[in-house]
Amino acid sequence: MHVVVVGALVENGAVLLVHRSPTRRAHPDRWDLPGGHVEAGESELQALVREMREELGVHIVAESSSRLGDLPAGSGEDAVHVGVWHIGDWVGSPTNCAPDEHDDIAWVGISELGGLPLVHGDLVALVRSLPDPGRLPRADEARAAASPSSPKAHRCPPLHR
C-alpha cells in the first residue's frame, strides 16, 4: 500500500489548494491539498515537512502540525493511504515550486470547498472539522521574517532529478 501525506495550510478562513495538471496520470485536473508520497524511512511528519518545502517553498513548523484524519483511496494494488494534516504555522509565502505537477495554487474559502472538483470529496469534512477555521492562529510575518531560515523558505528548493 502506498502512503501519501497532505497538508492543510489555513489562513483567514481559507485553505491553500493545488490544482493537479491535466496531464497528470493520477487525478488530473482536480484540486487537492499539497503533499506527496512518504518515502522509505520517513515518518508522515517528516514527509510533510519535505513535501511542503519541495512543492510550496515553505518551511512548516512541525510542532504546529496535527493530524486531521485519514482518507483511503483506491483498492488492491492501487490502494493508497492518505494522511491529512493541519499545518498551524509556516515560514515563507507559498509558491508553486512544482509546476510539472500543479498548474495553479489558490487560497480557497473553506465554505467554497464543496463546489470544487476535489481529488477526495471527504476532504471537505476534514477541513471543516477544524475549530473556528476563520480564526485559526498563524504566526505573524514579522516573526517569520526574523527567522534564520526565512531567506531559504521563500525560494523553491533546487530540483533533484
Image: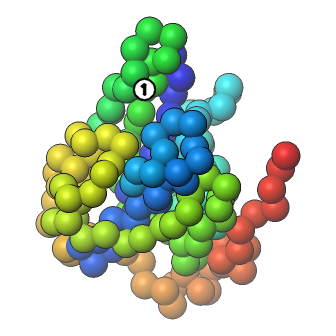
The answer to whether any part of residue 116 appears in the image is yes
The answer to whether any part of residue 91 appears in the image is no
Q: Is residue 3 left or right of residue 96?
A: left
Crowdedness near tag 1: few (<14), some (14–19) or many (≥20) residues, C-alpha within 10 Å: some
Where is residue 138 drawn, in percent x and y? 37, 74
Q: Residue at x 51, y 90 (%)?
A: 142
Q: Is residue 50 left or right of residue 161?
A: left
**Colouring scheme, one of rainbow, by chain, secondary structure, one colour:** rainbow
Q: Dividing the picture into quarters, in which one does residue 109 lie?
A: bottom left
Where is residue 33 drawn, in percent x and y? 42, 53
Q: Dividing the picture into quarters, in which one does residue 14 lie?
A: bottom left
Where is residue 136 drawn, in percent x and y? 26, 70
- The amino acid sitting under disc 1 is His
Total numbered badges shown on the rendered structure: 1
Q: Residue at x 67, y 27 (%)?
A: 41
**In the rendered view, would you say 108 is above or below 3?**
below
Where is residue 55 drawn, in percent x and y? 61, 58
Q: Residue furthest bottom?
A: 142
Q: Nearer the viewer, residue 31 or 35?
A: 31
Give the residue at mark 1. Answer: 81
**In the rendered view, would you say 19 is above or below 48?**
below
